[in-house]
């Protein structure tokens, strides 16, 4: 079980990913009151970065192994990436999909129409969630290329957040989804929620479980924290995720998400799928 002390957390992924998550978890208390920065339980980033912000992103990447900027206009991607390369670091990128009022309305309809299949049980990650459920959540998410945030974030101890998982009839975690309001309330993105972490175990696909959990996460963040905008990053070749997100009203935008990576640690690719 997660101790009450949020300084002790469970981290996920490879050794390098776990190292990044630990460092970010302990870095965030130093930066959480600065509206420039955001944190979803994986690494601390600086959103809406401009070329003048590259030294800060570079410092974050060198400290953590990786950093990130959401809300980068597509028209500025090449210039920003060039500045990052000039700092001796490498980049990765995702298309930023976004949804607002139409997304919230769509998710409400999805929940109204959906019926959970027999034998599946819904759980919200909380401070007393058993380790066995985290084991299953980790297995399911990582098998889909999704890196779960640290447990202190998943359980909403340190961030405004929610994480859902579905136990399958065989006792394993069939699917998961989550959302985190990464930025301080005072930030220009203070009313927006990072959303996603959609993953479904191969044996449980084809039943609309990701749509169901994704919709629940949107409505939870809207009803409990007032989130009015939702965003996620999707690779250009990930047709399945693009389809699911679009069905929930989270659609491609004029922004992209730029990762800044220490090549000694993440030289083979991004910190997550």
Image: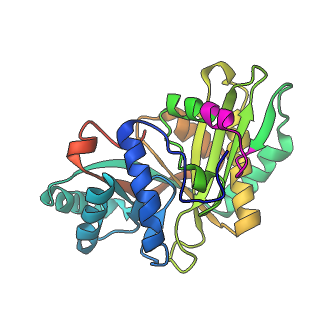
Q: Is residue 159 visible?
A: yes
| Residue drawn at (24%, 74%) of the image | 52
Q: Which quarter of the figure has residue 84?
A: bottom left
Left or right, 258 with respect to 200, comes to: left
69 is within the stretch colored magenta: no
**Quarter of the image where the C terminus is located:** top left
**Quarter of the image where the N terminus is located:** top right
Q: Which quarter of the figure has residue 168?
A: top right
Residue 66, percent from left and from top: 32, 53
Q: Is residue 70 visible?
A: no
Left or right, 61 with respect to 241, comes to: left
Residue sticking out furthest to the bottom: 186
The vertical placement of 8 against 228, above or below, is: above
| Residue drawn at (43%, 70%) of the image | 37
Residue 247, percent from left and from top: 65, 43
Q: How many marks?
A: 0
134 is within the stretch colored magenta: yes
| Residue drawn at (21%, 45%) of the image | 263
The vertical placement of 225 against 122, above or below, is: below
Highlighted magenta segment, given as a residue range? 124-136
**Front-lying residue, 262 or 101:** 262
**Front-lying residue, 30 or 195:** 30
Q: Which quarter of the figure has residue 15?
A: top left
Q: How is the image coloured?
A: rainbow
The vertical placement of 12 against 39, above or below, is: above
| Residue drawn at (39%, 63%) of the image | 45
Residue 258, percent from left and from top: 34, 55
């Amino acid at each position: 079980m997660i101790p009450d002390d949020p300084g002790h957390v469970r981290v996920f992924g490879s050794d390098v990913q776990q190292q990044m998550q630990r460092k970010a978890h302990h870095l965030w208390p130093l930066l959480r009151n600065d509206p420039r920065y955001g944190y979803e339980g994986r690494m601390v980033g600086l959103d809406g970065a401009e070329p003048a912000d590259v030294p800060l992103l570079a410092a974050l990447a060198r400290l953590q192994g990786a950093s990130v900027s959401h809300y980068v206009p597509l028209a500025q991607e090449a210039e920003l990436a060039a500045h990052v390369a000039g700092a001796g670091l490498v980049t990765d990128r995702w298309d930023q999909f976004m949804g607002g009022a139409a997304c919230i309305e769509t998710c409400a309809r999805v929940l109204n129409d959906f019926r959970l299949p027999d034998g599946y049980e819904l759980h919200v990650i909380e401070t007393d969630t058993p380790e066995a459920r985290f084991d299953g959540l980790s297995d399911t998410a990582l098998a889909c290329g999704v890196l779960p945030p640290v447990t202190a974030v998943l359980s909403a101890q340190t961030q405004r957040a929610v994480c859902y998982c579905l136990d399958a009839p065989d006792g394993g975690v069939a699917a998961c989804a989550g959302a985190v309001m990464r930025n301080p309330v005072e930030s220009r993105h203070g009313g927006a929620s990072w959303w996603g972490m959609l993953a479904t175990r191969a044996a449980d696909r084809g039943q609309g479980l990701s749509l169901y959990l994704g919709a629940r996460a949107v409505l939870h963040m809207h009803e409990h924290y007032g989130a009015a905008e939702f965003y996620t990053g999707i690779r250009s070749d990930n047709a399945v995720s693009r389809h699911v997100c679009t069905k929930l009203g989270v659609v491609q935008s004029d922004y992209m998400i730029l990762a800044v990576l220490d090549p000694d640690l993440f030289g083979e690719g991004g910190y997550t799928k």
